[in-house]
Amino acid sequence: MINQLLGKVFGTKNERVIKALMPKVAAINALEPQMQKLSDAELHAKTDEFRRRIQERLSRFAAGGNGKPPAENDSSPESEDEPDVDRHKRLEKEEYDAVQEVLNEILVEAFAVVREAGRRVLNMRHFDVQLIGGMVLHQGTISEMKTGEGKTLVATLPVYLNALSGRGVHVVTVNDYLAKRDSEWMGKLYRFLGLSVGVIVHDLDDDERRAAYAADVTYGTNNEFGFDYLRDNMKFDLKDCVQRGHNYAIVDEVDSILIDEARTPLIISGASEESTDKYYRVKRSKGLLGCPRNSPATSWWTRSIATLRSPMRVGRRWRDCSAPATSPTRRTGR
């Protein structure tokens, strides 16, 4: 009762969030006549302009202003005693914050460009509610929209904005059909604005997956993204990995993927790095270690070597050559 009363007086959390975003919606709408006057080439050139502004902001991280890596230019007293790993994480955090700052600055203009591109290429214009949904997704929060409100079109706004940094964007769908459909459907808009599009589906080899992940926008299912991540962690050389990093992702049907399907873990296995042949070679050379061939320990070893697989357990039993005959419990290694 109290919460309902407070909600009527001050508004709900959702209403306050939407109210805070309305000035940006108005600014995007104000740019619409200006964007309609641009030619296709001029609209395409906006992507290069946005990328140039982002790179200018990041230039101090790339060269530190004097051609040196940022770590060599960080000569503050605190950084001298700072471990290299911590300093690297801190510089990555500063670079990420700089990217987010410039993306927020160009958000209004970038959304206006995407809206105009959608009208020309897809014959679909983003409505105000879709602009709000796009800004919510850019903030990294959940945008709940009803059926028919155009969730697929909403995703183009934050996808385009975050792909401008050149670090890649992943769009996670629930099945291969939607991944292919959306990559072809919305891919027309991205390619019109100068972005590359890739799609991850089943039966792709590593070279094809690597090329898809190298695109500005990559569509795929949660299982494909997840297993590619696990396989990359099993590679011995970084150049064999297919994923290039994890910058920004949009998850379609987030309640299904992060709640329902998350109950089933992704498990992957690989070939063992250790060969079991060494145990059989040790068995054949047991007489060389100084144990009598007919001793109780040797007799136990002969019966049990085929069932043991732990080197530590084998070594501990083998050294006990003078031990009496083992009990059934010890014989099974329990």
Image (cartoon, grey):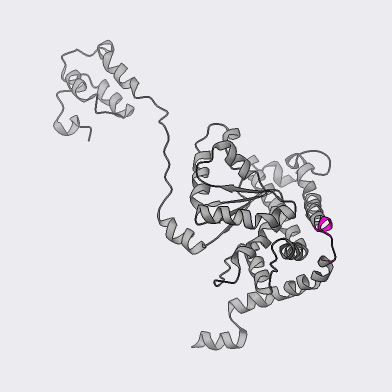
Q: Position of residue 205 (x, y in %)?
A: 54, 37
Residue 324 at x, y = what percent?
Answer: 15, 23
Q: Position of residue 255 (x, y in %)?
A: 48, 64
Would residue 254 be seen by someone viewing this image from the given angle?
Answer: yes
Examine the image and state in which quarter residue 326 appears: top left
Q: Is residue 39 magenta?
A: yes
Left or right of residue 3: residue 246: right
The answer, for residue 97, to whether it is visible in the render is no
- Please determine whether, in this image, residue 313 is positioned above or below residue 2: above
Q: Nearer the viewer, residue 268 or 328?
A: 268
Which image quadrant for residue 306? top left
Q: Nearer the viewer, residue 66 or 204?
A: 204
Quadrant containing the C terminus in the rendered view: top left
Magenta stretch encompasses residue 191:
no
Q: How many marks?
A: 0
Residue placed most toward the observer, 63 or 260: 260
Residue 210 at x, y percent in the picture: 60, 40
Is 170 situated above or below 269?
below
Instruction: State the residue at coordinates (67%, 66%).
Output: 135
Q: Residue at x 44, y 56 (%)?
A: 262
Q: Which residues are magenta?
A: 37-43
